[in-house]
Amino acid sequence: MDSEEVENMRGLLKVYRDGTIFRLENPRMFVQPSLQGEGGVASKDVVLNETLGLWVRLYLPSSYLQQQTEKRRLPLIVYFHGGGFCLFSPAVPDLHNFTLKLTQSVGAIVVSVAYRLAPEHRLPAAYDDCITALQWVSSHAVDGGDFERDPWLHSHADFSQVYLLGDSAGGNIAHHGVVRSGGVEAWSPMKIRGAIFVQPGFGAEKRTRSESECPPDAFLTLQHSDACWRISLPVGSNRDHPFCNPWSDGAPKLEDVTLPPLLVAIGGRDMLRDSNYVYCESLKQCGKSVEVMVLEEEGHAFYALKPHCQSSERLMERISRFISSSPSESVIDITDVA
């Protein structure tokens, strides 16, 4: 047995030359859901596919659990978390707390998806899980179907007001899930009104300036990003694979795909800053609706690491405004500089 480490993700995930994989699975690293509610938000876990290990954590404002009178239905957010395709789940404290705050701030139901992780399940496994999760959600909007209905979604969700949210790798997953499924029109009668991508994870073999200048003490470094791509992309692929670089040869032509209006949040000190700009500008050239929010002082994952900072509050306010305003089909270009 060759016990040499070939990849080490901050001690949480280790990959060895002989193919052995170690994951740190300490129960104290995870938060259990609470039907009693935390900060006015109830949560529970639902298994979608036991064989695949695919599950979701649902979040609902607590007042809707014991409603005695008819309340309005709530917007529905389907959330895909970050972690370089290989780390974390909805039960990680930082992500759980972010989703609690999102639910409370926006006044929405949130479905946080625990997709399969690399390297045990390389891409496109996470994209397939994205599509399965959307199929499960959309099954509540029609009669019948292959999925068991959840009472929270059945009773309280407005399926004409569905939004996707993804941060870092989760933004990549939501993007590819929509593209691979044929665009937002494929989900009718469920209406995907918009998508919010926070520092979405895309790249290419050619280094951007923000990648080359990324300091070694950043939360997301170039070394860490490269390692995530190595263990997540199909074996033998490089960063010009369409999963990483949606503008590479062989990638779907995005001008032909019906994408929802987008809000993209970019960190001014994030290694992914320049690739995020390229993503937004390329989509606008295809005639897509893209709002851009720039938080100049922030690095990667600030909203989870510093949930109460001014930038995190501004991000939550912008997400709320984006959802409540029901973005139009026209091209929008709004840039906020923190």
Image: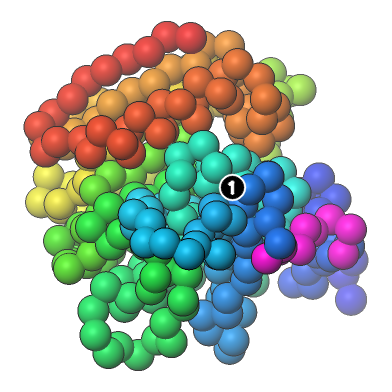
**x and y percentages locating residue 267 in the rendered image:** 51, 21
Count of numbered tags: 1
Residues drawn in magenta: 27-35
Residue furthest front as drawn: 68
Identify the image quadrant of the N terminus.
bottom right
Name the residue rendered at 70%, 50% in the picture: 38
State left or right for residue 190 relative to residue 16.
left
Q: Is the magenta stretch mostly helix, strand or loop?
A: loop
Give the answer, above or below, for where 131 lies relative to 219. below
Q: In this view, does 183 lie above or below 216?
A: below
> Per the image, is 30 magenta?
yes
Return the x and y of residue 296 as percentages of the image width and height.
51, 11
Please report the residue visible at 22 percent of the width from the left and 20 percent of the height from the top.
333
The image's colouring method is rainbow
Residue bearing the label numbered 1: 99
What residue appears at the point 84 percent right and 56 percent down from the top-left corner? 29
Among the 4 quarters of the image, the one containing residue 39: top right
Q: In this view, does 215 lie above or below 142?
A: above
Would you say 165 lies left or right of 213 here? left
Say what amino acid the circle numbered 1 marks. Answer: Thr
Where's residue 290, x and y in %?
A: 24, 31
List x then y, in percent, for residue 23: 80, 64
Bin the neighbour count of mark 1 within 10 Å (Cα to Cα): few under 14, some 14-19, many 20 and up: many
The quarter holding residue 332 reads top left
- From this viewpoint, is residue 232 visible? no
> Going 63% across and 28% down the picture, which residue do you hit?
302
